[in-house]
């Protein structure tokens, strides 16, 4: 096992901002005058499935107009070149990490380009619009297709894998996340308890800034490539 430190990275909407994907704070938590917590929730979906499908269809269609930025590319480079473990956890539902070349991405809040049948739980890649009248190809039920997204009040995906990675982290880096949504916001505390060096990359102060030991204040597109160069340089010796 290499002596190189194991690194855990958590990304949020801020890493995709320079690619042109609006952050939740940019929308100050609203969409078409609905609070995002209402739209991105099981109650919101059962109350008004057409509204929720519209919310996700619009964001899914917008993916074809945006591209990875140097921050996504730098993380993919770290995953390729760092001799130790690198675990990439994202709260984002876009596919920009994958398109930047990241070999493994833990989408703890799901993915825009996947749909799930609420009847049989089958998940499939989905690039088009979803609607409330669609039939599931597997169980044939109608009207049960939903975005494969973790809504507010639902349990995030891959929590066991995440806990394992956090407990063995020697460096924990959070990039472009405001630290308001749990359990992701609490990951820094778990890593710090495990003795990790903690680094926050953000343009602003966040709800969790005081828990991080180090800060790289600025745009992810500039600060992440510099941080990756620093980390790779230190393992090159
Ligand atoms: C759960 C998918 C149980 C949907 C999302 C009361 C108190 C505490 C917690 C709760 C509470 N009531 C309810 C809860 C729990 C709730 C929660 O935390 N609510 C909040 C609102 C208080 N959480 C849940 O419901 C979660 N589930 O708790 O289940 C459980 C717990 C543990 C274990 C098992 C079960 C599920 C939450 C998931 C919801 N789904 N996404 C979709 O995308 O449509 S959340 C969504 O919002 C994102 O995924 C992300 O997580 C969050 C937005 O945060 P950010 O990504 O940080 O984005 P934001 O816009 O806020 O900030 C951008 C940041 O970038 C800023 O800091 C900005 O300065 C910076 N930035 C901008 N540009 C740049 C930049 N930085 C660098 N460079 C730039 N260019």
Image (cartoon, helix red, strand yellow):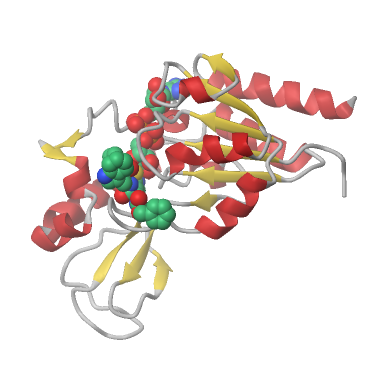
Q: How many marks?
A: 0
Q: Quadrant of ligand 1?
A: top left
Judged left or right of residue 149, residue 5 is right
The one nearer the camera, 84 or 64, is 84
Asked which quadrant contains residue 6, the reply is: top right
Q: Position of residue 225 (x, y in %)?
A: 64, 23
Residue at x-position 69% and y-position 46%: 168
Could you say which is closer to the camera, residue 162 or residue 218? 162
- Is residue 28 found left or right of 63 in the rendered image? left
Looking at the picture, does residue 47 appear above or below residue 1?
Answer: below
Vertical placement of residue 237 versus 78, above or below: above
Position in image of residue 146 (x %, y %): 27, 64
Q: Position of residue 223 (x, y in %)?
A: 58, 18
**Image point (36%, 39%), residue name:** 181
On the question of residue 189 being in view, the answer is yes
State the image coordinates of residue 59 (x, y, percent, origin top left): 29, 45
| Residue 11 against residue 210 in the figure, above or below | below
> Would you say residue 21 is visible in this rendering?
no
Residue occupying the point 28% across, 73% down? 118
The answer to which image quadrant residue 12 occupies is top left
**Of the pair 90 and 18, the residue shown nearer to us:** 90
Which residue occupies the extreme right position in the image? 237
Query: Could you tell me which quadrant the C terminus lies in?
Result: top right
Q: Residue at x 9, y 59 (%)?
A: 47
In the shown orientation, is residue 162 left or right of residue 205? Answer: right
């Amino acid at each position: 096992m290499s002596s190189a430190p194991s690194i855990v990275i958590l990304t949020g909407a801020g890493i995709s901002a320079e690619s042109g994907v609006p952050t939740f704070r940019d929308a100050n938590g609203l969409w078409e005058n609905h609070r995002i917590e209402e739209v991105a929730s099981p109650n919101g979906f059962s109350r008004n499935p057409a509204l929720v499908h519209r919310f996700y269809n619009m964001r899914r269609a917008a993916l074809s107009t945006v591209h990875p930025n140097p921050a996504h590319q730098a993380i993919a480079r770290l995953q390729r070149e760092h001799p130790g473990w690198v675990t990439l956890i994202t709260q984002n539902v876009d596919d920009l990490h994958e398109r930047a070349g990241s070999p493994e991405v833990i989408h703890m809040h799901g993915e825009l380009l996947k749909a799930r049948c609420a009847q049989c739980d089958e998940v499939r890649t989905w690039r088009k619009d979803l609607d409330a009248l669609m039939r599931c190809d597997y169980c044939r039920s109608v009207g049960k297709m939903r975005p494969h997204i973790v809504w507010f009040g639902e349990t995030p995906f891959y929590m066991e894998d995440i806990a394992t990675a956090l407990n063995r982290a020697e460096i924990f880096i959070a990039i472009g996340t405001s630290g308001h949504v749990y359990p992701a916001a609490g990951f820094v505390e778990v890593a710090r308890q495990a003795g990790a060096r903690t680094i926050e990359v953000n343009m602003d102060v966040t709800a969790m800034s005081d828990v991080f030991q180090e800060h790289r204040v600025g745009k992810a597109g500039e600060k992440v490539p510099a941080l990756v160069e620093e980390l790779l340089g230190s393992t090159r010796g």
